[in-house]
Image: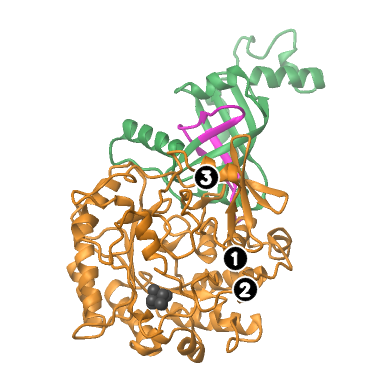
Amino acid sequence: MDSLPEDLVALVGDPASTKAIAAMGPDGAPSVAVRDTLAVLDGGTLAFAEELDTSPTSRALVHTIWFGGAVAVSVRRGDRAFHLRARPWRCALVGPLFTRFLLEARARLGGDADIAAVWVLKVDEVRDDSPATLRALDEARRPHAGRHLDRASVVRSDEVADPPAVAQVPVRRYLARSS
Amino acid sequence: MVTSNALGPLALAARYPRVPRFVLLKMDIQRRGLALTPAALDAVQAPEWDYGRSYVIYGQGSAARKNAPGPLLLRDGTSVMVLAGADYADGYTVDLRDGAFVLLDGDDAIDEVEFTPRPDYYGKRTSRGVPMETVATARPQRLDINPYRHCHFWEGGNQCRYCAYFTDVKATSALADGHVARKVDPEDVYETVREALKEPGRFSQVMLTSGADPSGTQVFDDEVERQIEALQAIGRNFRGRRFASQLIGCAYDKHQLRRLHDETGLATFCPDIEVWDPKLFDWICPGKAKWPGRDGWIQSALDAVEVFGPGNVYTNAVAGVELCKPHGFATEDEALASHFEACEFFAKRGVVYLSLVWIPWRGSQLHGQAQPSLEFYARLVLGLHDIRKAHGLRAHNDDYRHCGNHGDSDLERLD
Ligand code: SF4
């Protein structure tokens, strides 16, 4: 992608948003990790710092850049969320991008903080992952099929005289039975 | 140089699915060499890339007219130790296209690449006026220091037959305004390292290597004395006792190894065996065969395990040279079997055996000889990696980050 939507750029830049990277490791197992350092570079690229070469995420990124495939990025704050499909494009151990992320880590965490590399991701696809957007899409695609009938009932289940409380639902017994 | 390009990186990546295209590409660039187009060469004269006139000390540079860039960087973060501009007949090319460096194989654009940015200490001088880039050169994450730039094996023609080390010292010294002295002043080493460490996150290791010098009361005593002097000078820059470091040295005896360990902060030691087969070792490395002989080089590595600990001792093989004519192995299979035997032998004893791609440098006795196929190197790195892994050994101090010269340790990034 040549550029990213402005609201995505703003959400990535929001220090309060949660940013997570998911990738497939060399053993075929997925790994997911929150990476607060995720930032938008110019165009359709993102970058974030990896603290260790040996982290599951680092190994999964190396595996992906070597053998192909995509990684997923999730960015969310409150009811705004995006899901991205991206390719690991560069692993920087040296140079201005690396130094910028290192200095930011040290400014945040102290002078002994360290990073191993900065990974650059090229974004191929952006999806609005906000619950309201997904719900609207779902309703449009299969009207009525994705909702429980009590929500459309004349008297909704939360409006009856004595609505069931969360605490009364015997989940523990159910879980115990099913395990 | 003569190379067989029967199968290139892409075809081999399909045939050997555990060897990534990047590792194959790196080894093929090392094998076949690299040239820069005029546009790329002009671009690397910019301050952020320019490694200066004195970077090339290994005898191959064409940097006399223009300055050389630092090591090539592939997108996966690995570096390619190759001298841009050496006399390769069928090498890769780097061009500048739309402001980015692009690697070409003939007319085919292969991938985006970069060069290692120039470190901040380049262009500065020590208090004795010595340009710091002549004291230490920079890989992406490693400082390389040659405290003594002369190999006495060359006297009397005892040099290793593949070696072109220091053959350009005179020319390089002239390029560096006479500042490449045979012996580097330890104070210059101290000051250069101190300056280099001011750049945040730029280096993870210091590597020392020198030409061989068998002189002294015991063989190599004088050389060891110089290494200790340089390591102590470097060590003054660190708070703790040990610092991330590697010494590529000669076949030191136990007493010399103990001194290096006890009197300096050295972390790892690497006496290079170069060629495993006994007859080929004697023929290809006559200096090593004489001082103190193949058994002595092996014993030194094993003694070093006692001193530095298992996994902290390395030895390199110049992979492919064992196939050189007229006495080398006749087939790549025989050569591979020899490497695997060596790797197994050392791995059992806690020594990390690594491969380097043999380049028949101009200035070496083997210049002009044919190199093995890229497939040989694909099979080699896979085999070496698997043997070491089976023995629980990792090349922590000689991996993609610290060295960049070994396809087999690059594979450890997934382990
Ligand atoms: S020991 Fe051999 S490889 Fe090393 S510098 Fe001397 S001749 Fe060259």
Number of other residues with Cα within 10 Å of mark 1, as a class: few under 14, some 14 to 19, many 20 or more = many
According to the colouring, which chain is green?
A
Which tint is chain B? Answer: orange
Percent of width and height locating residue A42: 56, 27
Name which quarter of the figure residue B172 lies in.
Answer: bottom left
Q: Nearer the viewer, residue A121 or A160?
A: A121
Residue at the far right: name it: A142
* SS type, badge 1: helix
Instruction: Return the residue at label 1.
Output: B31
Query: CB under 8 Å between callouts 2 and 3?
Result: no
Kindly identify which chain the residue marked by label 1 belongs to.
Answer: B
Instruction: Return the residue at label 2.
Output: B371
Q: Give the colouring mode of the picture.
A: by chain
> At x 66% / y 42%, what residue is drawn?
A70
Q: Is residue A170 visible?
A: no
Indicate which label's residue lies in the foreground, 3 or 1: 1
- Which residue type does callout 3 highlight? Cys
Query: CB under 8 Å between callouts 1 and 2?
Result: yes
- Answer with the quadrant where ligand 1 appears in the image: bottom left
Is B402 located above or below residue B42 in the figure?
Answer: below
Percent of width and height locating residue A23: 59, 44
- Which residue type does callout 1 highlight? Arg
Instruction: Return the residue at label 3.
Output: A91
Relative horizontal placement of residue B353, taking residue B203 as reference (left or right): right
Do badges 3 and 1 share one subunit? no
